[in-house]
Every structure is written in structure tokens, then in C-alpha cells.
Amino acid sequence: MNLSFLRYGIMLKATVIIFLVSSCKNSDHNSTKPTTEPEANSRATHAFLREDIITSAEQKTLTPDKVMQDLKAGNTHYVQNKLTQNDYIGMLHHSAEGQYPEAFILSCIDSRVPVEEVFDKGIGDLFVGRVAGNFVDEDMLGSMEYGCKVSGAKLIVVLGHESCGAIKAAIENEKLGNITAMLAKIKPALAMSKDFAGERTIENHAFVERVVKDNIINTVRTIPVKSPVLKGMLDKREIRIVGAYYSFETGEVSFLDDK
């Protein structure tokens, strides 16, 4: 037998054996590879994410008072920085075929008032309408009628906030483009505050707060006057309409009693 050929055969067998041993070791190593801490934490966190939404059956069991208490509890979570961790993609998928929110929130446009977070809510929980100065017009009333009469929301919250720029502009009687007509809808709140004894300027925080709250109350009163649909639901106690004031200092929402 040719010596060179014999040596080649021995080397080939050795190479095959080394390859097989190495493969087995790698296979064993991969099968017993422990889950890293970030991976474990990610899986554990995902298990506690909320992905469910309000269903039609659940919405039908709600009452205006129950929704009110739920929003108050959610705001407490927000103030304490203990918001629910939401799986937004999961909620998105669950809500694709329908929505059954519990409340309609009318808020100012202010970027410092993140409405869903303020009440610890996610996708499908709330209807949110926003306009500077949180007043109502025909379009907003129609949106509220859709949210409550058509889609089953049980509560309307008119949410004003501390140091509102629209309120300050109304106090200053600003005139600029369409802002002029918009501010006219806020002016009734100034008339409501005519008994205010202090300085009636935007530098007086107490006066601005008074007008903000009077504007909230005026909007709450205006809704059933201008919407027979919502008034009928209100009279039957199918819905409630309430005012609320948001504090930039604490994040707390204070619900106002109508005067």
C-alpha cells in the first residue's frame, strides 16, 4: 500500500472525529444555555402587561357612578406614578373590531394634560375631545352624542386645567384671526366671575383659577341645554355630566360640584 495514501486516510479519519466531538459539545452547550437576566425580565414583565379592553358586555354593566370612581382611582395611580403597564399592540388587536369606552373626556388642547395617562387608561377606554378652553360647540356636542348615545359611554367629564392659556387670552380680550371667535365662547365665564373681589388680571392666579372653574361649570350646564339627546339621557340617569380641574403642581384631578 502506498505510504502517502495511508497517511492521508488516517488524517481524514482524525478530522471527522474532531468535527463530530466539537459538534456534540456545541449542541450540549446551546441546549443548556441559561436565559439571560434581561430576557427573563422581559418575559416576566410581559406577563403583567394589560392587553384586554372594555367589551360590549362589560360596558353594559357600568354605571355613571362606577365610571366616576374608576376615573378617580386611575388618577390616584397617575399621581402616585403607578400607572398600569399596557401592551398597546395587544390592545390594538383586541379593539380592531369595535370600541366600548366608559367615558367621554372634553379637555383643553394643552400638551401638559395627557388625558389617558391622567386617568390611567389605555386604548379603547375613553373618547377624548380637545379644544382650547374646553367649551362645546355643535361639532363637539355631536361627538358627545355619538360617544354616549351611539357608543354607550356613561360619563362626560369637562376637564379644565390650571393656568389655562385660552382663559388668560379671554381675560385679556385677545383678538387674532379665528381665535377671536373662539374666545367669545369662553366669555360667559368672565360674566360668572363678576363678583370676584380681587384683582381681575392674568397675574392674579386666584382670579385665573376662578374663571377656569367657572368656564368648566358653564360648559357642564351648556351641554344638556344645547343637546336634547344628552339631556334625555341625563334625565334618565343613563349618563352623568361633571366638571373637573387638573393641577399642574400635583397631577391631581379635582371633580367640581355644579353651583
Image (tube, rainbow, N blue to C red):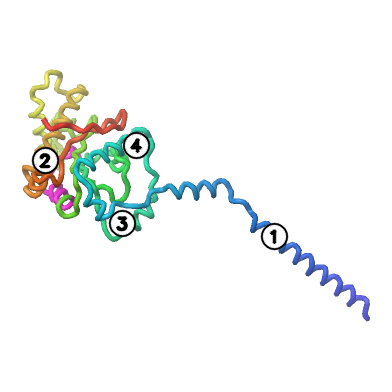
In the image, 194: left or right of 1?
left
Q: Amino acid at mark 4?
A: His
Q: Earlier in the sequence, mark 4 or mark 3?
A: 4
Measure the C-alpha gap from mark 2 to mark 3. 38 Å
Residue where numbered disc 4 is placed: 77
Most foreground residue, 47 or 156: 47
Disc 4 and disc 2 in contact, CB within 8 angstroms: no
Measure the C-alpha gap from mark 1 to mark 4. 49 Å
Query: Is 10 drawn above or below residue 200 in the view shown?
Result: below
What is the magenta range? 131-147
Tell me the SS state at disc 2. helix
Residue extending farthest to the bottom is 1
Residue 143 lies within the magenta run: yes
| Residue 45 image position (x, y, % from top left) | 47, 46
Measure the C-alpha gap from mark 3 to mark 1. 45 Å
Residue sitting at 31 percent across and 28 percent down? 249
Q: Which mark, by number, is residue 26?
A: 1
Residue where numbered disc 3 is placed: 95
Residue where numbered disc 2 is placed: 181
Q: Dot 2: few (<14), some (14–19), or many (≥20) neighbours within 10 Å?
A: few
Q: Amino acid at mark 1?
A: Asn
Measure the C-alpha gap from mark 4 to mark 3. 24 Å
| Residue 214 image position (x, y, % from top left) | 13, 31
Query: Is 259 drawn above or below residue 229 in the view shown?
Result: above
Q: Amino acid at mark 2?
A: Ala
| Residue 245 image position (x, y, % from top left) | 22, 33
Residue extending farthest to the front is 61
Q: Earlier in the sequence, mark 3 or mark 1?
A: 1
Q: Earlier in the sequence, mark 2 or mark 3?
A: 3
Disc 1 and disc 4 in contact, CB within 8 angstroms: no
Can residue 10 be seen here? The reply is yes
Q: Earlier in the sequence, mark 4 or mark 2?
A: 4
